Image (cartoon, helix red, strand yellow):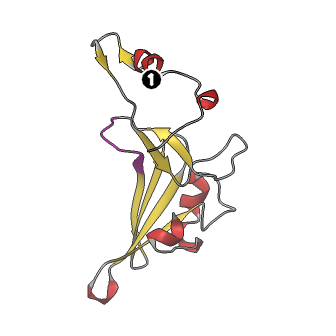
Amino acid sequence: MITKNTSDIHMSEQTILNKSKDDKFDVLAVELMGYDPLGKDDDGNIVGTLNRVTLGALGDYGTNDTIDSGGYTYIGKESAEGSWYIQRIDKSGGGNVIRYATQVNNASTEIYTDAWSNKVSLSYGTYSQAF
């Protein structure tokens, strides 16, 4: 059995349920949240953030640019909040190898336009290395 010191409880279950009611549709409502590993604090530092999940045709990131250059396909993506990543697809060798450049593995590149301009010289890594 899990117990909690009642002095640590800030709102009753009933209060929480009352605040969770959607008046327009007259139903209980919960909010979906998603973790963004590239989310920034107020000072612009990457700290990872918990954000509301919104419905949109583009998802969290939209594609800004694509180009085939030097044996690679580059796909530049950016979120509405300014987080960015670039996918680099290497099609040589009979398969596709996808690597990512983000602000995690390119700390000095803060904005998308700089990242896209310097896409060839960015550091790329696997998904776990870049996110």
Residue at the image position 69 percent from the left and 62 percent from the top? 108
Main SS of residues in magenta: loop
Q: Is residue 51 magenta?
A: no
Mark 1 nearby-residue class (10 Å; few <14, some 14–19, many ≥20): few
Q: Is residue 103 above or below residue 35?
A: below
The one nearer the camera, 15 or 99, is 15
Residue ID for mark 1? 13
Residue range in magenta is: 55-63
Q: Quadrant of residue 102?
A: bottom right
Q: Is residue 53 above or below residue 61?
A: above
Specify the farthest residue to the bottom. Answer: 93
Residue at the image position 51 percent from the left and 39 percent from the top? 3
The one nearer the camera, 85 or 39, is 39
Rendering coords of residue 12 (x, y %): 50, 21
Secondary structure beneath label 1? helix
The one nearer the camera, 6 or 26, is 6
Could you tell me how many numbered marks the image carries?
1
Rendering coords of residue 80 (x, y %): 49, 40
Q: Quadrant of residue 72?
A: bottom left
Q: Is residue 118 above or below residue 91?
A: above
Amino acid type at mark 1: Glu
**Is 104 on the left-hand or right-hand side of 44?**
left
Q: Quadrant of residue 114?
A: bottom right
**Is 26 on the left-hand or right-hand side of 9?**
left
Rendering coords of residue 122 (x, y %): 58, 70
Residue at the image position 44 percent from the left and 45 percent from the top? 1
Residue at the image position 67 percent from the left and 63 percent from the top? 107
Q: Is residue 57 magenta?
A: yes
